[in-house]
Image (cartoon, rainbow, N blue to C red):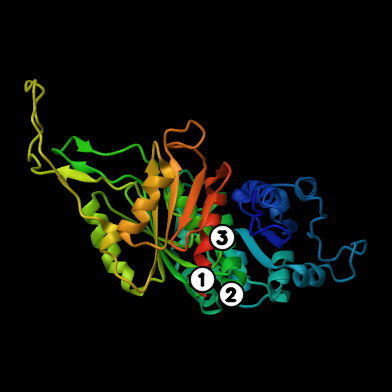
């Protein structure tokens, strides 16, 4: 299992006085699970919602919360925490803290650490929608953006006031995704590369209700996109399934094979590589009915015609990776695909396997390259398979 991008990174988590403070415990916990060393700065106001002891239990580190503590383990604790941090995340960030950081004030433990740190800074706001939309908050957020501080969210939903609006703290997954995106852009081995990834099974309409499709979940394509994001690439994910956005990845939703092909052609001229993880439909209906076909028709004759071949339509000057979903003679069929589609390598997998078939979180693939190399990989998580693909892709950029 490949180590997370966050492994052995020191993340300074700032927690401020919002009702969403309790969610910071989950953020800290997930960062620890990713292998990060998590230190916490918590404001006095935040301790009204959650105790410092909770964070000590989760992270194993004593939080910094009292700027005047004469018994602090370090003489200048905010300096020590700030200097050791690879990344600082403030989540939740109140309107007050945002104002302090925007103007360089140091009036609480979190703002003090933010001012002392040279590490990249991510801010995840949480407040009532009226506070978020206030012109003063907008001005303060713009000041932060001008200082290259990244803003995560907020999200739309039910707020502490009971009203619906924009102001909810971003999800833990989104915040951790933003952290990986930021760190990947600093030290990733794909920084400066632009990669197109396709995902999901395309749908070919028969009528306004029915369609021709396949069982592809899109998980493999999403995993490849996430892995490329973590390694610093600029990623465009063209997907026919809706699995939610990935922080730092440009998502384009499509439905049919022709839709996907059109979008690929829009993006490909500025890309360095394309990874066709999508299970595109090989056929489409010759004629799409404008109204629903009624069930009284017991026998229906349908005429299918071939869809365009997306990967074969992409010209030279870009690294091309195809997928081959097979049930038998996997290497033989994948080798034939490698030659016919003129790609650099093919990722072949047995979709009939219970362990690595459709909708599984794992995959077992064989990678066949045009130089003759054949690598049969063990059963891996799909994110690890994504990294294996990218490990080979990098060689084509050298």
Residue 77: x and y in percent read 83, 67
Dots 3, 2 in contact, CB < 8 A: no
Q: What residue is at 79 percent from the left and 60 percent from the top?
A: 64
Question: What is the number of the mark on residue 124?
Answer: 3
User: Does dot 3 land on a helix, a strand or a loop?
Assistant: strand
**Crowd rating for badge 3 (residues with CA inside 10 Å; few <14, some 14–19, many 20+):** many
Vertical relation: 360 (above or below) 117: above
Question: What is the number of the mark on residue 102?
Answer: 2
Q: What residue is at 79 percent from the left and 69 percent from the top?
A: 78
Residue situated in front as seen by the camera: 37 or 226: 226
Question: What is the number of the mark on residue 141?
Answer: 1
Residue 179 visible somewhere in the drawing: yes
Residue situated in front as seen by the camera: 367 or 261: 367
Residue 119: x and y in percent read 67, 72
Residue 229 visible somewhere in the drawing: no
**Crowd rating for badge 2 (residues with CA inside 10 Å; few <14, some 14–19, many 20+):** many
For the residues labelled 1 and 3, the Cα–Cα distance comes to 11 Å
Residue at the outermost right position:
71
Indicate left or right for 210 with 185 as reference.
left
Q: What residue is at 50 percent from the left and 46 percent from the top?
A: 365
Indicate left or right for 237 with 78 as reference.
left
The disc, 1 or 3, on the residue closer to the chain's N-terminal end is 3
Dots 2, 1 in contact, CB < 8 A: yes
Q: What residue is at 44 percent from the left and 47 percent from the top?
A: 348
For the residues labelled 3 and 2, the Cα–Cα distance comes to 14 Å
User: Does dot 1 land on a helix, a strand or a loop?
Assistant: helix
């Amino acid at each position: 299992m490949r180590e997370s991008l966050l492994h052995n990174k020191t993340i300074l988590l700032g927690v401020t006085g919002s009702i969403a403070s309790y969610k910071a415990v989950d953020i800290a916990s997930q960062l620890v699970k990713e292998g990060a060393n998590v230190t916490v700065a918590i404001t006095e106001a935040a301790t009204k919602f959650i105790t410092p002891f909770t964070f000590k239990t989760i992270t194993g580190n004593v939080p910094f919360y009292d700027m005047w503590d004469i018994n602090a383990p370090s003489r200048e604790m905010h300096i020590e925490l700030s200097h050791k941090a690879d990344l600082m995340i403030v989540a939740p960030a109140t309107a007050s803290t945002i104002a302090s950081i925007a103007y360089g004030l140091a009036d609480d433990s979190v703002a003090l650490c933010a001012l002392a740190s040279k590490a990249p800074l991510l801010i995840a706001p949480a407040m009532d929608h009226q506070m978020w939309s206030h012109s003063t908050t907008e001005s303060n957020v713009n000041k932060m953006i001008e200082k290259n501080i990244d803003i995560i969210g907020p999200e739309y939903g039910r707020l502490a006031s009971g009203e619906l609006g924009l102001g909810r703290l971003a999800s833990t997954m989104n915040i951790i995704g933003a952290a990986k995106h930021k760190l990947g852009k600093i030290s990733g081995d794909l920084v400066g590369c632009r990669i197109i990834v396709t995902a999901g099974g395309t749908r070919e309409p028969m009528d306004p209700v029915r369609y021709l499709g396949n069982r592809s979940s899109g998980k493999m394509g999403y995993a490849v996109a996430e892995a490329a994001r973590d390694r610093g690439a600029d990623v465009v994910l063209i997907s026919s399934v809706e699995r939610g956005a990935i922080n730092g990845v440009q998502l384009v939703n499509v439905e049919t094979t022709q839709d996907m092909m059109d979008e690929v052609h829009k993006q490909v001229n500025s890309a360095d590589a394309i990874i066709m993880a999508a299970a595109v439909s090989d056929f489409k209906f010759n004629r799409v009915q404008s109204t629903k076909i009624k069930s009284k028709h017991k026998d229906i004759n349908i005429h299918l015609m071939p869809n365009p071949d997306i990967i074969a339509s992409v010209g030279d000057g870009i690294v091309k990776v195809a997928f081959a979903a097979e049930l038998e003679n996997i290497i033989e069929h994948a080798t034939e695909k490698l030659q016919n589609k003129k790609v650099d390598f093919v990722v072949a997998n047995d979709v009939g396997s219970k362990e690595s078939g459709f909708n599984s979180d794992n995959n077992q693939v064989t990678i066949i390259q045009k130089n003759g190399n054949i690598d049969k990989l063990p059963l891996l998580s799909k994110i690890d398979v994504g990294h294996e693909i990218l490990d080979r892709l990098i060689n084509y950029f050298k």
